[in-house]
Amino acid sequence: MACQQQFYILLGNLMSPDNNVRKQAEETYDTILGQNKVTFLLQAIRDASAAEEVKQMGAVLLRRLLSSSFEEIYPGLTLEMQTVIKTELLTSIQQETSPNIRKKVCDIAAELTRNLIDDDGNNQWPEVLKFLFDSVNSDSVTLRESALHIFWNFPGIFGNQQQHYMEVIKRMLVQCMQDQENPHIRTLAARAAASFVLSNESNSALLKHFSDLLPGLLQAVNDSCYQSDDSVLKSLVEIADTAPKYLRPNLEATLQLCLKLCADTNLTNMQRQLALEVIVTLSETAAAMLRKHTAIVAQSVPQMLAMMVDLEEDDEWAMADELEDDDFDSNAVAGESALDRIACGLGGKIILPMIKQHIMQMLQNPDWKFRHAGLMALSAIGEGCHQQMEAILQEIVSFVLLFCSDAHPRVRYAACNAIGQMATDFAPTFQKKFHDKVISALLQTMEDQSNPRVQAHAAAALINFTEDCPKSLLIPYLDSLVQHLHVIMVAKLQELIQKGTKLVLEQVVTSIASVADTAEEKFVPYYDLFMPSLKHIVENGVQKELRLLRGKTIECISLIGLAVGKEKFMPDASAVMQLLLKTQTDFNDLEDDDPQISYMISAWARMCKILGKEFQQYLPVVMGPLMKTASIKPEVALLDTQDMENISEDDGWEFVNLGDQQSFGIKTAGLEEKATACQMLVCYAKELKEGFVEYTEQVVKLMARWRFLNCGSRVRVAAAESMPLLLECARVRGPEYLTQMWHFMCDALIKAIGTEPDSDVLSEIMHSFAKCIELMGDGCLNNEHFEELGGILKGKLEEHFKNQELRQTKRQDEDYDEEVEESLQDEDENDVYILTKVSDVLHSVFSSYKEKVLPWFEQLLQLIVQLICPTRPWADRQWGLCIFDDVVEHCSPASFKYAEYFLRPMLQSLCDTSSEVRQAAAYGVGVMAQYGGETYRPFCTEAIPLLVRVIQAADSRAKENVNATENCISAVGKVMRFRPECVNVNEILPHWLSWLPLNEDKEEAVHTFDFLCDLIESNNPIVLGLDNANLPKIFLIIADGVANESIKSEDACSKRLANVVRQVQVSAGLWTQCVSTLNETQQKAIKDLLNTA
């Protein structure tokens, strides 16, 4: 493109409302070389004769170019060209007359500076700093504005010189925030100050130094709000979110200001909600700090409730057949959300006493809006005030149920909402205590024919109730429930045919599904009542507006099928499959947002569970669309503050703030369906095993390339969960194919362990990785894998210790209180859970590689030794010992070279105050005896009296101690069995026999029964007693073992024990003597053993 004029035409076309013209212009623009783009765009911005919108477009594109392609373009420009760009930008800021263009050029200058700070923090454009200082001290208001705008956009502009310029920066901001003649300068300076604070959030000394700017910032918040500008208030919300401690010196003033703004009905709804957002955000990010200002929090609660009363009268409301999404901009929704969050943030101990009286008054108000808001408030605080509300649940529920028959339909709706929410928040206590009252109230409300919206919400509350209702509680109501649901379904089907209304029917169909799901086989008698109508809806409800109804009906049919079982469902299975297949065939015609897609995907998986192997024939039809949905690539973007202003979360985007004016955005549309599809693939692999082998490769390739932050946590969990299952499927094709599949997975799994930010997902990934290694065995990891894995595990352990130190620091904080301690305990449990997964991974490596892996393990050795220090928390010592247990079990006798690190702590831990630590230590002694070899003999001898002391302690069989005790009993057995020279067997054996059977630790029970069989089969005189006098006692031990499922028919020892019993059976007198001492349960257990073994 030779001519600048042609480029202007191109810029115009890029703004064209005509899609085709714009698309063609974008393609042409993309073909221009980066360096040429810079030249053309710079000329466009500097051309005084060019139209404003052309210059504006040029400025936007140049900033984007520097943001996205700086490394590819800028270093390749000549030094002269680089100087021209810098000079032209600064000249343009000084000469440009259009405020809009000038602002955009400032953005370009900020973006260029951001990229010109090198790795050591040197700013390679010193002229921009001189420009900044000159402009801020200039008489020209526009230059002062420009300087503040650049600093706001990139507060890191001083690079490694920031400390040097600290006083200058502070003076500059203070001076501008005090500019009485120019409110706009004050506003910009306040935003720039906030931006600077946010970019230095972790520098507590700096935050303290800049704390005297806060009063000015608060004044600017107030002033700008009354000039219809909420930008400084938004900055305050960001500070509350990211650097809440900055507000501490002036917290009272901050809260008072926000309360004042929130209460001022002259301000816009958005401004009032933002003011409230500051308080609510602080309850989440600095709860302990806020708990010291309960008086102000107490004043904010009525503000939230007042917002919730801000409802429109709507005559059409009760009859609406389409549910609109909540209007998140409305005061009512904002107030409810704020209440929910502040209750969760500050806890029920503080919030419930503040709100209870208000809610009671609202519920007695003659105006329906107050009663509605009171009930919705009860729904909102259930999660945060869980403990405190549980104590007065009887009172609350009795009161709420009265409103199911309120005169106003929207109040009845709110009562159903409160019941549904409490059924979820307080399950299953709620169901156990109030089933009779709640079920009858909801069924009565569902008969409200003149208010379909209320009917539908009562059905929705019934779904919440039944989902978490214990089966035994629901059965007595089954007849009544089914009868009501059937009557309503028939009536609403007629309405659908006559009037086309469907809202209630959609909910009732789901209620039926939920009841069937809980009732399981007890639903069989009602199956024929519903199935014909449900099939009729799927067959005939093909219109676009019935898509949701049809999807929910497909879900209902598959859930009923799963509930009643294959035998009852089979006669209909073929017809249902044909209906699903027909929908599936039309699948390609369905729009991407069709709600039927996710219902279909889940229904197929349920059909797979019902039909088992017979489902395999349908895979060719099912897998195409399923893979298509599972392969949805979410749209992601790295956005800066400028781009963020043009995109809102309402457009289906969610954002994660990365700091430095940048955010990571992900478009969430389709993510739910993707997650469901991935979970269904897991289901097929689990159910069909080798029957799924045809699809293993494509599913492995899909799952192994999932990008971590780019898709929801459910997708990442499903991907991780699928890996070992897919290996199981692949096995059928032989070792070569299996290895090939593992190669696709291995790198992805190891990388995921290193990068996964969500601890719940991380634990799933580590668990799956460990299972895969156990499946694949020796040789599945190469040197690079080991190197990477070692580095990652080392990092996880170091992070574990660092987090513990951080928690100790938080305990010294001036805001520390018991609620903070609770959240620290939660963090601690989270950390320990990751530690258990580190142990799982090491277990799988040790069990697969044996002593060959010890040189690799040595990089972690000191960290594991640190875990078992006596000063560390019990969970650290427990898992540290578990790791050394694995070293002994799988890597002996070579393990003895580490004995100096773990043997003393292990023996000392046998008498630890923590039962978990005792259990890990006792298991260690058992494996020393079984696998350790000669070198461990003295330690086995030393351990015996310690083990016996634990077993014989008075409370050794108490619930919290029994597992540790049983491991001690098993360890004594293993020493006698594998190292008899270490112990006086004749002395210990009678005691050991008296301690049997083991009922809790099933794994160790098998070891003890194996040893018992050895002893009986070798006619050990101590075990059998004189003239077989101990046989009745042995029978008792065997019977209890079978009754408690400590012995399973598949265990090898069950056959051996059955033989012992059969030998006694031969002698009638002895048999009678042995059986007569057993109770009915024990006799049945002996009979079961003989029948199955």
Image: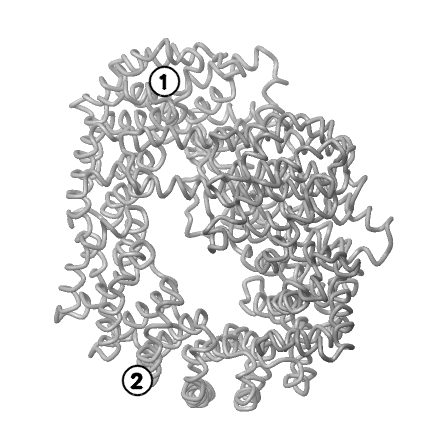
- In the displayed structure, 647 sits above or below 96; it is below
- Residue 13 showing in the rendered view: no
- Tally the marks: 2
Mark 1 falls on what kind of element? helix
Few, some or many C-alpha atoms within 10 Å of disc 1 (few <14, some 14-19, many ≥20)? some
Q: Does label 2 or label 1 sit earlier along the sequence?
A: 1
Q: Residue at x 30, y 79 (%)?
A: 437
Going by the numbered disc 2, the residue's amino acid type is: Ser
Q: Image check: 334 left or right of 569?
A: left
Mark 2 falls on what kind of element? loop
Q: Residue 425: percent from the left, percent from the top?
A: 37, 62
Q: Residue 191: percent from the left, percent from the top?
A: 30, 29
Q: Image check: 833 left or right of 971?
A: left
Few, some or many C-alpha atoms within 10 Å of disc 2 (few <14, some 14-19, many ≥20)? few
Q: Give the position of the N terminus as an image quadrant.
A: top right
- In the displayed structure, 1000 sits above or below 444; it is above
- In the displayed structure, 1065 sits above or below 225; it is below
Q: Residue 905: percent from the left, percent from the top?
A: 57, 31
The disc placed on residue 94 is 1
Q: Give the position of the C terminus as an image quadrant.
A: bottom right
Alpha-carbon span between mark 2 and mark 1:
69 Å
Q: Residue 368: percent from the left, percent from the top?
A: 18, 70
Q: Residue at x 76, y 36 (%)?
A: 933
Q: Quadrant of residue 604?
A: bottom right
Q: Image check: 173 left or right of 974?
A: left
Per the image, the residue denoted by label 2 is: 450
Between 148 and 907, the one lying in front of the other is 907
Which mark lies nearer to you, 2 or 1? 2
- Residue 53 showing in the rendered view: yes
Going by the numbered disc 1, the residue's amino acid type is: Gln
